[in-house]
Image (cartoon, rainbow, N blue to C red):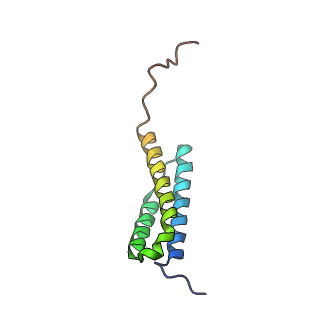
Amino acid sequence: MNAAPANSASAVREELDKAASLVLTAQRLLTTGTMVDLSALEGKVRRICERLAAMEREDGRPLVPVMESLIGDLDRLAEAIQQRVEPPPPNPRRNPYRQA
């Protein structure tokens, strides 16, 4: 059985799905306080972008919703990482030492 060409829509879709899985795993790890190495994700996204750029517009059009979903997932991951690095300041109206 022959594999699909690297720049075919089905091959790129597979790579998009793998990247989405990596993002989901990274989000889960962050919630547990585990350090996350994103180097594999960075390389995967770079290769996806290269493959998408090499595709004909019509071949890539069906992948737009999947790409948009991945971009949203990446944005949420970036927000989670930012909050972990720089947690929001405590609420000044809420005094943890004051008894209700």
Across and down, in percent, residue 3 comes to 55, 83
Q: Is residue 8 above or below residue 88?
A: below
Q: Classify 97 as above or below 60.
A: above
Q: Quadrant of the C terminus?
A: top right
Residue 29 in picture, x, y percent from top left: 55, 49
Quarter of the image with the N terminus in it: bottom right
* Residue ID at (57%, 49%): 28
Farthest-out residue, right: 1
Q: Nearer the viewer, residue 61 or 45?
A: 61
x and y percentages locating residue 25 in the rendered image: 56, 55
Front-lying residue, 87 or 75 = 75
* In front of the other: 77 or 67: 67
Instruction: Single out the residue that lies furthest toward the top.
Output: 99
Which residue lies at the image location 42% right of the left edge and 70% below the top edge?
47
Residue 36 location in percent, x, y? 48, 52
Tell me which residue sits at (44%, 69%) in the image. 48
* Number of disc labels: 0
Q: Is residue 90 left or right of residue 18?
A: left
